Structure formats: C-alpha cells, structure tokens
C-alpha cells in the first residue's frame, strides 16, 4: 500500500491530504461491487479510527463560545478505482475560526513536534492496513475463481492470457 501525505512547508498553512493506493498488478479491471464493498467497509473503519484519535485538544486561547471539534468533523474520504489500483483519499480541510486559513497540518500534541495527522496515519498503517489488504486480496481472489458466463469472442482478434498471483494462490 503506497501512500503520500501532504506535508506543510515552513511557515505555510496547508490542508492535510493522505492518498493511499493498493496496486493490483496483473488485474486489468476496476474493482467489482463485492470488492468495492470490502474497500468501503475498511474506509469507514479508518475514518472512525481517525476521528477517535483526533480528540483531547486543549483549545488554549480560544474563547468559550468559539467553535469546537472543527478539525475533528472535517475529515472526509473518497474511494476511486482504476484498471490496476484502488485509491483511498483522506482529507482534512478545516479552517481556523479567526483566520479562515487551513491549520490541521500543524496540529500536534503538547510536548511533541510530530504533526498529529502523521502519528494517526502511522497507527492506521500499523493496525488497520494489514486487514484491509488481506480482506481485499481475498475478495479479489474469490472473484477471480468464480466462473462467469461464457463469452463469444469474435474471430480475427488475438487474445492473451494473464496469470495473477495473490497471496501465494495461482
């Protein structure tokens, strides 16, 4: 699972966007409905985990009537698939209540310098990503093994066979 996290440049304010991709080398089709449902189920788990981790802020200097949980509620996600990959994009575009500027990439716990979105995403990769990969690979394997209806192939066209290796099954 490859992932790309947007990181802030010195002195700049930016949104957080995490893009993670599962490559399916050798499979030249989009995810089927059953496979997409597995991916969506894990997407919901990841989003719930991020929201659970994104709590406990001190709100220092913020007046009592100022909005709370702005960045907590700003987590969004999107799934897209191509012929060779499934992509999960997670984003947090919360804006400061005074400035209207993005700030989430700079949020960190007291006494720490590592941005909290990096800490939370590392936890996702360590705890939730292995199950996502295993479940999705198993669903793809099952769909490959299911025999579909016969298709008529027009003559005069060449065909090619593709071997796909998933988790030791060929």
Image (cartoon, helix red, strand yellow):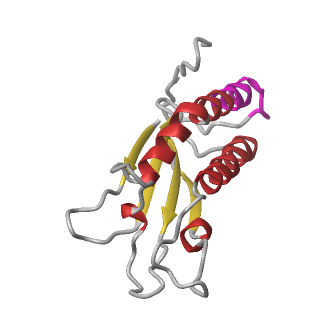
Give how far across and how far down residue 114 sits, in percent. Answer: 36, 48
68 relative to 86, above or below = below
The residue under the point 68% across, 44% down is 42
Direction from residue 103 to residue 12 in the image, left or right: left
Query: Which of the 4 quarters of the picture holds residue 71?
Result: bottom right
Position of residue 9 in the picture relative to residue 137 (left or right): left
| Residue furthest left in the image | 10
For this view, does 67 lie left or right of residue 92? right
Q: What stretch of residues is rendered in magenta?
A: 137-150
Q: Where is residue 5 in the image (x, y as percent from the top left)?
A: 38, 51
Q: Identify the image quadrant of residue 102.
A: bottom left
* Residue drawn at the location 59% of the way across and 52% of the way down: 50
Q: Which of 56 and 81 is in front in this view?
A: 56
Number of numbered discs: 0
Residue 93 position, x and y percent, is 47, 72
Residue at x 43% of width, y 66% of height: 104
Residue 146 covered by magenta stretch: yes
The residue lying at 48 percent from left, 84 percent from top is 97
Question: Along the line of sight, which residue is nearer the eye, 114 or 101?
Answer: 114
Residue 84 visible in the displayed image: no
Left or right of 88? Residue 132 is right
Q: Where is residue 117 in the image (x, y as percent from the top left)?
A: 45, 53
In front: 89, or 27?
Answer: 89
| Quadrant in which the C terminus appears | top right
Q: Looking at the image, which is closer to me, 92 or 88? A: 92
- Residue 151 visible in the current orientation: yes
Look at the magenta stretch and give its main secondary structure: helix
Q: Is residue 94 magenta?
A: no
């Amino acid at each position: 699972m490859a992932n790309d996290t947007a990181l802030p440049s010195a002195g700049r304010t930016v949104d957080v966007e995490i893009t993670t991709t599962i490559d399916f080398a050798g499979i030249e089709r989009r995810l089927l409905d059953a496979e997409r449902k597995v991916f969506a189920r894990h997407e919901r788990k990841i989003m719930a985990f991020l929201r659970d981790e994104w709590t406990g802020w001190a709100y220092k200097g913020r007046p009592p009537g100022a909005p709370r949980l702005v960045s907590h509620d700003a987590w969004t996600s999107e799934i897209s698939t191509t012929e060779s990959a499934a992509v999960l994009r997670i984003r947090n575009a919360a804006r400061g209540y005074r400035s209207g500027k993005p700030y989430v990439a700079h949020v960190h716990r007291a006494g720490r310098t590592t941005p909290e979105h990096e800490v939370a995403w590392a936890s996702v990769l360590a705890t939730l990503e292995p199950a996502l990969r295993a479940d999705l690979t198993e669903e793809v394997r099952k769909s490959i093994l299911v025999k579909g209806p016969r298709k008529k192939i027009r003559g005069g066209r060449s065909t090619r066979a593709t071997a796909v290796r998933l988790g030791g099954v060929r």
